[in-house]
Image: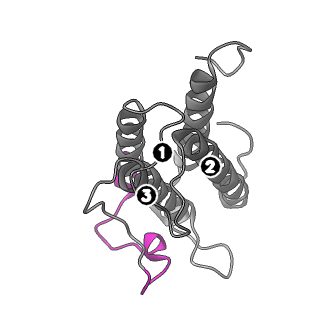
């Protein structure tokens, strides 16, 4: 479904909105060199590639861990060490970071397809709430959109490119 259309079910609109935001995130990092993708432009550990890794972990947290209740879901953060998604090794590269995000989004789509919007997560969140799939879609749209704003600024500072690429 194209977001320019004003029709569609609530679910179609939510799915299309999230997919649109996911594509914007990818467009913002494609074409960057690895050096630029991992460059820190502020006082925090944040980088463009780190934002994509963070979004990868967020996708897996909400859909695989919370909604589906999977055990052993891989994350790069922990209670002991925050910001691990912003640390890279010599073996890392942008294509792998992008591929992992695309895989996480595909996993999320498959899981979401098994549930109705009103279905609640198998696992409660840290506040004891079992969020509905509808809430997760809205939260993921908000989360991805917010980080797309960060990526907008990073891309403009890195190479001057602006807008939806």
Residue at 50% x, 54% y is 130
Q: Is residue 165 left or right of residue 92?
A: right
Q: Which residue is mark 3?
A: 61
Q: Position of residue 67 (x, y in %)?
A: 41, 48
Q: Residue at x 40, y 53 (%)?
A: 60
Q: Residues within 10 Å of mark 1 (few under 14, many from 20)?
A: many
What span is in magenta? Answer: 79-99
Between disc 1 and disc 3, the foreground one is: 1
Q: Which secondary structure lies at badge 2?
A: helix
Residue displayed at 55% across by 30% down: 15
Considering only vertical position in the picture, is 5 above or below 139? Answer: above
Mark 1 lies on a secondary structure that is loop
| Horizontal and vertical percent position of residue 34 | 45, 61
Which residue position holds label 1?
Answer: 120
Badge 3 marks a residue whose secondary structure is: helix
Quadrant assignment for the C terminus:
top right
């Amino acid at each position: 479904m194209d977001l320019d259309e004003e029709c569609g079910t609530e679910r179609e609109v939510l799915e299309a909105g999230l997919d649109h935001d996911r594509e914007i995130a990818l467009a913002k990092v494609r074409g960057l060199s690895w050096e630029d993708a991992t460059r820190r432009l502020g006082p925090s550990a944040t980088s463009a590639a780190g934002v994509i890794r963070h979004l990868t972990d967020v996708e897996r947290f909400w859909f695989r861990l919370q909604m589906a209740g999977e055990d052993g879901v891989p994350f790069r953060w922990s209670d002991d060490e925050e910001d691990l998604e912003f640390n890279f090794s010599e073996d890392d590269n942008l294509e792998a970071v992008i591929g992992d995000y695309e895989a996480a989004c595909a996993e999320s789509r498959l899981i979401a397809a098994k549930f109705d919007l009103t279905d609640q997560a198998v696992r409660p969140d840290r506040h004891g709430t079992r969020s509905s799939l509808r809430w997760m879609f809205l939260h993921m749209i908000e989360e991805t959109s917010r980080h797309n704003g960060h990526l907008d600024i990073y891309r403009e500072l890195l190479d001057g490119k602006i807008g939806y690429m």
